[in-house]
Image (cartoon, rainbow, N blue to C red):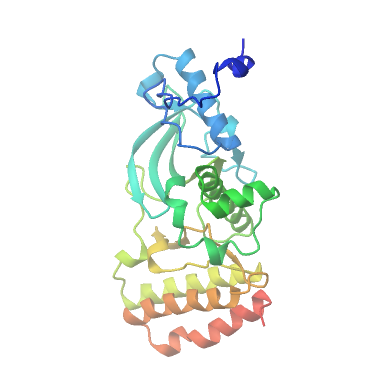
Amino acid sequence: MRSHDFSDFDRFDDRPVRRKPRKPRFADEPAPARGGRLTEHERARLARLRDDAYTETELPGGADRWSTWDAGGHGPSPFPDWVVTELAATDTELGLLKTGKEADVHLLRRGLPDRSRECLLAAKRYRSDEHKTFHRDAGYLEGRRVRRSREMRAMRKRSAFGRNLIAEQWAAAEFAALSRLWTIGAPVPYPVQLSGTELLLEFLGDDGGTAAPRLAELRPGHDELLRLWHQLVVALELLAGEGLCHGDLSPYNVLVHDGRLLLIDLPQVVDVVSNPRGAAFLERDVRNMAKWFAARGLDAGEIAEQELAARLRRSAGAP
């Protein structure tokens, strides 16, 4: 019998009823938001938590959850051999890799209970509560719209429902950007899976779980610095050839793994032509990176900042 079948009998007079918020049934279930509606992804996620709580008292090997491979969108195919796709796999949380203004990145091990197949993943989880005044929304969301006007209103008002929609939109935008860039051979981590506000990515680091350093943390010599600059130029040219720029590029969202430069943090990737500020974003990307490389020892002739920016604008089709 459904609880809403008796919705007309909730009160016996005209006085409004003040109900207490429902407490979480399980230890790992978050408290319900005050007001607003759950998005479809969030509703499905909570349903899976309830189902797991009813069917399993303890997961194999002390894992935190069953693999969510069957519950989300997948990265470009063919999938790399290291991606664990078996539904019998479990996910185990290994710790926090990075905390940011809009999302946290956790280290996750996905593998079969007998440890015969497993891989490390970076689980990037966008926090909807932080989107009350998400500082990048206004400029980067130009040209991105959802189909339903009620959802647009919720996002503008920053209601609980709207903030969760924004978080899901940013996760989906980053997943789509990474999938597109991976397909054309750009130096980005492989996007394994998207489920609501959680994005599972290739972990860039060693087998022991130590993440690759950010460019800002390195002090390379001149020859290595020049190699990294050339790698960056190739990456920017690949993006520009697709009409895109990173949009928020800095030495803090570039990793160096085994001598290879990789771009990360791409939820705000910008279409240089359709976004009115696209050319400005592109030029800022070049300026930010040129400044860092110049401060580390490359001279103006090796960087050629103005020439690079102009070449990228032409490649992207910007005026």
| Residue at (39, 55) in percent of width and height | 101
Residue furthest to the bottom in view is 301
Q: In this view, does 119 lie to the left or right of 140?
A: left
| Residue at (35, 51) in percent of width and height | 99
Q: Is residue 136 left or right of residue 291?
A: right
Q: Which of the pair 310/276 is nearer the observer? A: 276
Q: Position of residue 294 (x, y in %)?
A: 36, 82
| Residue at (49, 26) in percent of width and height | 89
Q: Position of residue 164 (x, y in %)?
A: 52, 44
Residue furthest to the right in view is 147
Snapshot quadrant of residue 317:
bottom right
Q: In this view, does 215 lie to the left or right of 155?
A: left
Image quadrant containing the N terminus = top right
Q: Do we see residue 85 in this rendering?
A: no
Q: Position of residue 37 (x, y in %)?
A: 56, 37
Image quadrant containing the C terminus = bottom right
Q: Is residue 220 above or below residue 174?
A: below
Residue furthest to the front in view is 14
| Residue at (52, 68) in percent of width and height | 247
Q: Where is residue 298 in the image (x, y as percent from the top left)?
A: 37, 83
Q: Do we see residue 25 in this rendering?
A: yes
Q: In this view, does 171 lie above or below 54?
A: below
Q: In this view, does 189 lie above or below 295?
A: above
